[in-house]
Image (cartoon, grey):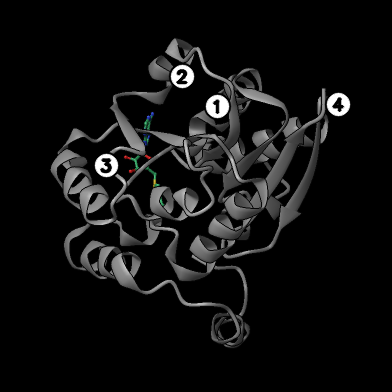
Amino acid sequence: MSIIPAGINEYIENHSSKAGGILDKIERETYLKSIYPRMLSGNLQGRFIAMVSKMIHPKLILEIGTFTGYSAICLCEGLAESGHLHTIEINEELKEQHTIIFKEAGLSNKITTHYGDALEILPTFNLQFDLIFIDADKINYSIYFEQSLSLVRKGGFILADNVLWSGKVLQEKNDKTDKDTMAVKEFNDLVQNDNRVENVMIPLRDGMSLIQKIC
Ligand SMILES: C[S@@+](CC[C@H](N)C(=O)[O-])C[C@H]1O[C@@H](n2cnc3c(N)ncnc32)[C@H](O)[C@@H]1O
């Protein structure tokens, strides 16, 4: 899932740090066991997310869309000493896997996984987050953005994945049967026209937007 030519992508990978350890293990196991392994962030995006987190040094992180836990562990790399990450996943079948890998990563007491629909769970939070990672179903991205804006502190950051949606965002005509593409385009327009935020779109893998709440 990359819009960048394979050769350039390989060059970028070869000139970026390697995660190693538990993250490589999760990646291998996800590719062996999961039906949609490409949903996992992977090395390059994982290193980027980890770097962003290290720059922000957040006390509280929220992730929407845990999958096999890869990005949650990357995000925790920058967590402040007393910090905590909350992550939301609709697929309860991943619960056992999460328990095992978060323990192996030494993060059991740093990560709380909430199982259920993010649309229902997000309004129940009474916390102010420093960093929010949106990486769940595209159809609800615009709602997640609105909810994230009320959950992130002023000056805090929202990261959103898949904002280029394999390049389909360039489709001029709105194909009403392609609901995901329409939702990603709507989300990108919403962010671009919102004067409560500053935003930069990064052509990393399937595209990421880094959004700061400024007021
Ligand atoms: C792209 S994957 C997340 C990948 C993960 N963040 C990573 O980088 O390794 C999206 C995840 O969101 C979950 N998801 C989809 N719809 C959801 C919803 N409404 N609420 C919570 N999780 C949802 C899916 O089950 C899937 O595990």
Q: Are there few (<14), some (14-19), or many (20+) residues within 10 Å of tag 4?
A: few
**Disc nearer the start of the sequence (1/4):** 1
- Residue sitting at 64 percent across and 17 percent down? 150
**Disc nearer the start of the sequence (3/2):** 3
Mark 1: secondary structure: helix
- Residue sitting at 60 percent across and 68 percent down? 3
- State how far apart marks 3 and 2 are (Cα): 21 Å
- State how far apart marks 4 and 3 are (Cα): 38 Å
Would you name the residue on which mark 1 appears? Answer: 144
Q: Amino acid at mark 2?
A: Leu
- State how far apart marks 1 and 4 are (Cα): 17 Å
Q: Amino acid at mark 1?
A: Tyr
- State how far apart marks 4 and 2 are (Cα): 23 Å
Q: Is mark 1 within 8 Å of ligand 1?
A: no
- Residue sitting at 30 percent across and 56 percent down? 36
Would you name the residue on which mark 3 appears? Answer: 108
Classify residue 30 as left or right of residue 53: left
Front: mark 3 or 1? 3
Mark yes or no: residue 177 visible.
Answer: no
Classify residue 71 as left or right of residue 59: left
Would you name the residue on which mark 2 appears? Answer: 122
Would you name the residue on which mark 4 appears? Answer: 195
Q: Amino acid at mark 4?
A: Asn
Residue placed furthest toward the right: 195
- Give the image location of residue 83, x and y in percent: 48, 36
**Mark 2 in CB contact with mark 1 (< 8 angstroms):** yes
**Disc nearer the start of the sequence (4/2):** 2
